[in-house]
Image (cartoon, rainbow, N blue to C red):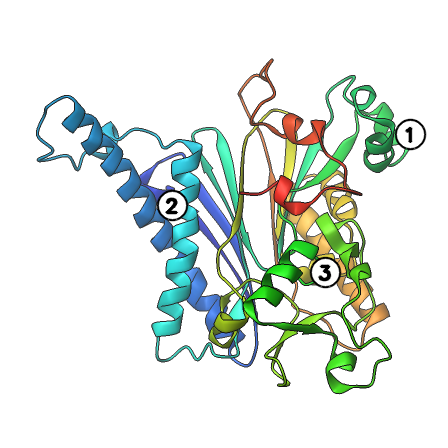
Amino acid sequence: NQDDFSVTQQFAGESSDVMFAVYDGHGAVGHHCAEFAKDNLPKIMEKALRQKRVKSYQDHLKAQGKSTKGSFKPELWPQLGVEQYEAACKKSFVECNTKMHQKEDVLDKLSGTTAVTVSFHFGRMTVCNTGDSRAVLGHRMAEGAIGSQSEETKSEIVVDDRRQEERELVAIPLTCDQTPFRRDERERVKKAGAAVMTVDQMEGTSLRQECNEDWDRKVAGKEVIVDGDVPRLWVPGKDYPGCAFTRSIGDSIGDDIGIIPDPEVITVDVTPRDEFLVLASDGVFDFLSNQAVIDMCSQSSNPLEACEKIVAASHEQWCENEDRIDDITLIVLFLQSEKESKPDPSGTTDELLSNFNLQSLEPTHLFS
């Protein structure tokens, strides 16, 4: 099993903060890469966040003409704003990647790992994603929210009359798979020097010798793909590395063809209508849709039961459709918030939904 996960309580020294993460290793030593990320990424993020907070406190003291001596008093450090918090997270992913490259006993030339994380801080959740694992939120629509959507958006969100009557529970992707299926990612890696082809195209056995734009069909996790010949990244003229993703931690051979560790990040306020959160490797989502996974959560009495249902359903689909079974790892959270819903939806999932259309949404509209 090349997957791994981590749960870090009292994250960055805050008693009420916590970080969850799922790692999906790949390549000959992918399990070592996932383990390295598990052991190091949370610590690197904690250090970066602490440094941001103490610097903010020191800047505050300086502005008041006071000495910064003895400023290591965490109880006095200010909470970080969204931009500060996200900047620390982004820096941490890049630093973890650099440290993995430098680690002599982790041979990450042709191996690496995805990483999807969520950290709860000051009533918000910040999701970071590098690779093709996912974070999916189960959100209960507000009364009247369906009617406020355009007809096109409504057709994408409303699944059936039963859920609409129950104030529909919708699956909101908080990540978007970073693969060559995405036009923006495909163009980015091509500019960096990557050749983007399927295995058949690379081997010269396909009639399609060039990348066609119909590869844009997996944006925002809308469609579940079961055919195996997917676009991959190659060093031009070579038969490696053959990555089906465009970002990862590790994979040092991909540094020159645009495989980067930089995560896409989104932060939203947690609201009472945010009921479930799922972090999972692609072993879950290769055959199950986001909505199907959230529906299984809603049909379960606790997170463990939800995990068992999702794993069983994923395993069954792999057995029926493939001669192998991918690693399946997930974390399910049942969310509770004591905060009242804000009249102003800015910064919440309600704002996300107000412009949400899975059919036309470009990933860059969601993530920073």
Mark 1: secondary structure: helix
Residue 360 location (% of width, % of height): 77, 42
- Name the residue: 31% across, 41% down: 13
Q: Nearer the viewer, mark 2 or mark 3?
A: 3
Q: How far from the left and from the top, in percent, is residue 168? A: 79, 29
Question: What residue sits right under mark 2 in the picture?
Answer: 88
* Secondary-structure class at tag 3: loop
Which disc number belongs to residue 181?
Answer: 3
- Residue 19's place in the image compared with 28, above or below, is above
Q: Disc 2, disc 1: CB below 8 Å?
A: no
Evaluate whether residue 46 shows in this view. yes
The three-letter amino acid code for the residue at tag 2 is: Ala
Look at 59% across and 25% down and name the residue there: 271
> Alpha carbon of mark 2 to alpha carbon of mark 1: how far?
43 Å
Disc number lying in front (3 or 1): 3
Q: Position of residue 106 (x, y in %)?
A: 41, 77
Which residue is farthest top? 343
Q: Earlier in the sequence, mark 2 or mark 1?
A: 2
234 or 106: nearer the viewer: 234
Residue position marked by numbered label 1 in the rendering: 161
Give the vertical position of 327 relative to 292 (above or below): below
